[in-house]
Image (tube, helix red, strand yellow):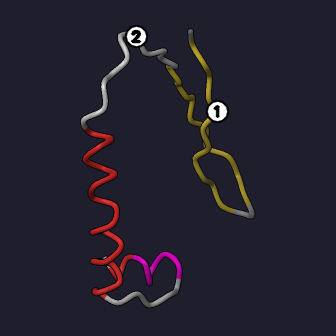
């Protein structure tokens, strides 16, 4: 985990610090997992069309997103 943090953010974090943070979060995560669920949830369906475009002299894939209800 500490190597991922370094790769992403360029900072060093000790294993002990990660353990201390994780130990504080676990009770909140367990409470969230055991919360009552709603009977109905809204759903948003997203779709995308992918196009190849030229960007700074090279071709890359870009997505144009469409919403459906």
Q: Which quadrant would the C terminus be assigned to in this image?
A: top right
Q: Looking at the image, tell me whether mark 2 or mark 1 is earlier in sequence order.
A: 2
Residue 6, image x, y percentages: 44, 84
Q: Within 10 angstroms of label 1, few (less than 14), some, or many (20 or more) residues?
A: few
Separation (CA) of disc 2 from disc 1: 29 Å
Residue 20 in the magenta stretch? The answer is no
Residue named by callout 1 = 64
Report the magenta residues as a range: 5-9
Q: Which quadrant would the N terminus be assigned to in this image?
A: bottom left
For the point 44% across and 90% down, the residue is: 12
Indicate whether 11 appears above or below 20. Answer: below
Indicate whether 69 appears above or below 59. Answer: above
Q: Is residue 36 left or right of residue 41?
A: left
Residue 36: mark in rendering: none
65 and 51: which is toward the camera:
65
Residue 34, image x, y percentages: 24, 35
Indicate whether 31 appears above or below 59. Answer: above
Q: Secondary structure at mark 2?
A: loop
Residue 5, image x, y percentages: 42, 78
For the point 27% across and 77% down, the residue is: 19
Residue named by callout 2 = 40
Q: Secondary structure at mark 1?
A: strand
Quadrant housing residue 39: top left
Q: Is residue 48 left or right of residue 23?
A: right
């Amino acid at each position: 985990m500490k190597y991922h943090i370094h790769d992403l953010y360029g900072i060093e974090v000790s294993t002990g610090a990660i353990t201390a943070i994780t130990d504080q979060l676990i009770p909140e995560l367990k409470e969230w997992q055991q919360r009552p669920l709603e009977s109905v949830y809204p759903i948003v369906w997203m779709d995308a069309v992918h196009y190849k475009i030229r960007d700074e002299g090279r071709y890359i894939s870009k997505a144009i997103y469409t919403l459906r209800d």
